[in-house]
Image (cartoon, coloured by chain):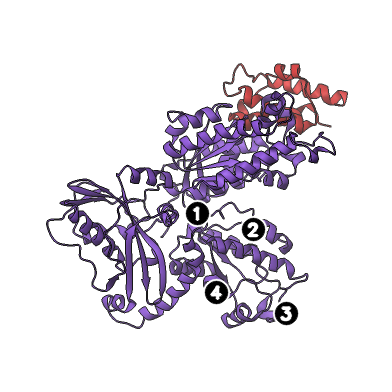
Amino acid sequence: MSDESSIVARVRELLAQVLDVPIGSIGTEFSTATTSSWDSLNHLMLISEVESSFGVLFSNQEIVDLTSVDRIVTAIGRHLASGR
Amino acid sequence: MTSMTTAHEVDSSILRGVAAKVAPGSSWSAYQAAARTLDKLPIESLPAHLRARVAVLGSFTLEPFLAVLRVEGARAGLWIETYLAPYGQYLTELLDPGSALYRFQPNVTFLAIDSDVIWNQRWAENPPLRTEPVVGGLLTPLFAGLDVFDRAGSGIVVVNDFVLPRRSTEGVNAFRNKGTFAHMIAQVNKHLRLRLATRDNTFLFPLADLVTQVGRDHAFNWRTHYRGHVSWSEALMAAVAQRYAGFSLASLGTATKCIVLDLDNTLWGGVLGEEGPGGIALGAHWPGSEFVDFQRELLDLQRQGILLAVCSKNNESEVLEVLRGHPDMVIREEHLAAYRINWEDKATNIRALAMELNIGLDHMLLIDDSPHERAWVREQIPELRVPEVPADPSLYANWIGSLPSLVVLHQTSEDSRRTHQYQESRTREAYRGSVGSIEDFLRGLGLRVEIGPATEGTMGRVVQLLAKTNQFNLTTRRHDETTIRRQREAGAWRVYTMRVADRFGDFGLTGVAIVEPAPDTWNIESFLMSCRVIGKSVETALIARIAADARGAGATALSAEFLDSGRNQVASTFLSNHGFAPASDVSWTRSLESPGPEWPAWIADAMATDGAGR
C-alpha cells in the first residue's frame, strides 16, 4: 500500500521526467494551466504510466479532470482505497 | 584515424553513455527524460557520419516513439534528428514533392503503417468479401508515393509489413475463406514484398517478426491505442527503434564493417591452452552445439560482406590447428580477413587489425565473453563498438541478431570476395617488405586498371562505394541510385568506374568518379577509391583518363573540390600532386593546355575504350 507522501513523490518524479521541469518546482499546485509542455499527448502518456505504476484505471472523465498534481494524487488515493 | 576528441566534444561514447541510463524497454518517461538530456548536448562537434536525419511517416500517433528512437539511436552511437509527418498524413507527404518531408532531406524515411488501414477498409466493403480492392486500395497510392519519392527524395525508404494485431474471431474455417482480415493481411504482405523487392532504395521492415519477438500480447497497448492512437507498447517501440537505428547507421555508411572475435568461450567452450584442441566444447551435442550455431550465424554475416577477424590471447599455432583441423569448426581460416593471436593486450591488437584492414575503429565491433576485457577495451578505444555479451553461451546465436549495427544495405559481388582480397593483401605486404623503392614495388605488382562508364551491373557497387568510402574521397558526397540515374539521363553527369587487379589478385571495382562535363570546364563532382587500392597510384590513372576524355571533348580545364570531412586526409594532396592549383578555400582548377596528368607507365590499361558516356 502506498502512503500519500510516496504517491506524491512518484507523481512528481514522473512529471519531471515527462515535462522536463526541475522536480523542485513541482508543488501540489503544479498544473496544466501553469505548464505549457503538459499538452494532451504528454497527458495521455503520463496518465497511462500513472495507471501502470499504481495498478489503477481511470475513467474518461477522471482523465480529463486530472490536470494537477493535487488532483492526480487524490484520484490515485481514491482508487487504491476502493481497491481498483 | 586517431581520436581527437576533447572533454568538451560529444562523441559516440558520450551518446552511448546517455542511453546506458535507460534499459531497453524501460517506461516511456525514462526514455523521455534521456531524450531531454540528448537535447542539451553540444553536438556541433559531432562528425557527419554520426548524425542521421530520420523521417517517420505514420498512420497512427508516433510522437512518443521519437524519444525512444533518439535514445536507441544514441545506444548505437548515433545522433538522430527526427522529422515526423503530421498525424495520418503519410500518403499526402509522400505524394507532394513540395512537402516538409522532402525539405527535410532525410537519410532514411520510415513508413510506419498499422493494420487499421486494412481493418477499416475491410469493413467499408459491403459485403466484406473481396480482397483485391482492399489490397489495391492500399498499395496503389502507397507505391505512387514511393515513385514520387524515388524521383524527388533523398536516401532510402523502409516500409513495414502488416501484423494481425489481436486474436482472431474469424473462426476455425477462416483458412478456407478469402476476404478475412487474416487473409487480407497475408495478401497485402505478399504483394508488398514482391513489389518492394524490385526497387533499389526501398526496404521491407520486419515488423511482424519484431511483434513475434516481443510477443503480440505485449506489443500493443490497447489502452493508449483507443485513447490517443498510440498503438505500440513501450516494448515494441524499443524493439522497432533499435532496428530503425540499424538502418540509420547503414544509410550513413556507419554500420559495422568488421567483427573482431575472441576465441575461448566465445567461438568455442573452454580454454584451448588448457584443454587442447580435443578438449574444447564444439560439436553436434551440448556442450558445444550452441557454439556451432553461433559460428553459423557469424558466417551468415560474413557472406553478406561483414569481415570477421580474430583477436585472442592464445598460442597462434594451437589456434591455427583448430581453425584448420577441428572437424566441427564452421569458421575456418579462409573466412578470416585478419587475426592477432598472441599475448599482447587486446586494444593494441585491435588497433593493429584496424591498420591492417584499413577500417576505422568506429566501424569495428568486438565480441568477447570476458567482462574485464570488454571494460578495458572500451576504456582504451571509446569509439569501438563493444556490446555486452550474454553470460550464457546458449544465448549467443539468438543475441547476435539483435545487434543493430550489423545491417548491410547493398550486397554486391565485391562483398563476397572481400575476405579473400584481404588475404591476398597479406601476401602483397610480404612482397613489399622484400623490394626497394616504391616505384620498383609498383612495377613489380603488375597493376592492371580498367576504366569505363558505370553500367546496370555496376550501379549497386557505385552507390555502395559512394556511401561507404571515407578516406580517399575528395568530396564525400553520398548519392543514391535514383539521383545518379536522373543526373546521367539528363546528361549532367558522367560516371566513371575503375577496376583494379594485380598479379596477386583482383581488387574488383574500387574507384568511382562523377564528372559534370561543360563545354570549357569539366568539374569533378566526386572522386573516390576504396581503401584497398590506396598507395598503388591507380588514382593517377583515373584522373589521366578523365583529363584525356575532357581534352577529346574540347574542354580546356578541369575543376575539383577537396572538402575536408575530418577523415579524408589521405586524399588531401591528390589535387596539388596532379597539377591542380587552388582557386578558393575548397575549389581547385587545372588547365588542360599544359600536358598531363600522365597515365603511370607501370599500370596496364586493361580496356582502352572511350571513357564514360551514357
Residues indicated by labels 3 and 4 sit on the same polypeptide chain: yes
Label placed on residue B279: 3
In this rendering, the answer to whether B88 lies above or below B352 is above
Give the residue at mark 1: B410
Label placed on residue B334: 4
Q: Earlier in the sequence, mark 3 or mark 2?
A: 3
Mark 3: few/some/many CA within 10 Å (<14, 14-19, 20+): few
Mark 3–mark 4 distance (CA, rounded to whole Å): 23 Å
* Mark 3 or mark 2, whichever is nearer to me: 2
Three-letter amino acid code of the residue under disc 1? His
Three-letter amino acid code of the residue under disc 2? Ile
* Mark 1 or mark 2, whichever is nearer to me: 1
Residue that appears at 16% across and 51% down:
B554
* Mark 3 or mark 4, whichever is nearer to me: 4
Pointer 3 and pointer 4: residues touching (CB < 8 Å)? no
Q: Which chain is purple?
A: B
Q: Position of residue A29 (x, y in %)?
A: 66, 18
Q: Color used for chain A?
A: red
Question: Which sits in the foreground, B112 or B358?
Answer: B112
Three-letter amino acid code of the residue under disc 4? Glu
Q: Residue furthest left?
A: B593
Residue that appears at 48% across and 57% down:
B362
Residues indicated by labels 3 and 2 sit on the same polypeptide chain: yes
Pointer 1 and pointer 2: residues touching (CB < 8 Å)? no
Question: Which sits in the foreground, B188 or B110?
Answer: B188
